[in-house]
Amino acid sequence: MTLEQRIRRLEDREEIRELVARYGIVIDDRVIDGIADCFTVDGAFRSRDGVLDARGREAVVAQFHGRFAVLGPSNHFTHDQIIEFDPEDPDRATGLVTSHAEVVRHGEAMWTALRYEDEYRREDGRWRFADRLLSFLYYVRVEEYASAMAGRERMRAYAEPAEADFPEKLPSWKRYYGE
């Protein structure tokens, strides 16, 4: 890579990090135009459990309207992020983001630990989400946190508890434990 290409790569990496940070802020602040601006025109927002599955910017925004109908205040914060650029296309990248959120859902305070598996694409000169796949380590009422972590049914955002998306379902986890 030339020096110019290396600098561009660093700038791209920082723009993607800012996209991820901005996403959390516009979600928490309910900035609908900001949510739309985070996604490509054909962008998708999905969850591993299949509950969320919106494709296309307008559908993504509509899906968030539905989520906000049951959510009160929220605080999303990201931790680590791995970004890998497509060696064949400088306008594409993938990433894994680890995150937590404090939310009020149906009037109850809840904590969630989550991961986003992202596909990023530069569209109209800006990096945006082309696909965002959400998975959960847990989504529990604050008072249930300690007891929930000891079991597999750590998804408690819905009517019935369900198994968490990770780590037990990961191929690496299964190999390690001989499952």
Image (cartoon, helix red, strand yellow):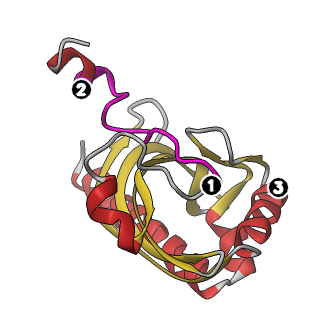
Q: Which mark is residue 158?
A: 1
Q: Which callout, 2 or 1, points at the residue further toward the start of the chain?
A: 1
Give amino acid for label 1.
Tyr
Foreground pick, 37 / 60: 60
Which quadrant is the C terminus positioned in?
top left
Q: Secondary structure at mark 2?
A: helix
Q: Which callout, 2 or 3, points at the residue further toward the start of the chain?
A: 3
Which callout, 1 or 3, points to the residue nearer the camera? 1
Which residue is the site of mark 3? Answer: 59
Mark 1 and mark 2 in contact (Cβ < 8 Å)?
Answer: no
Q: Position of residue 48 (x, y in %)?
A: 55, 38
Q: Is residue 108 left or right of residue 78?
A: right
Q: Which mark is residue 173?
A: 2
Give amino acid for label 2.
Trp
Q: CA distance from mark 2 to mark 1?
A: 25 Å
Q: CA distance from mark 1 to mark 3?
A: 22 Å
Which quadrant is the N terminus positioned in?
top left
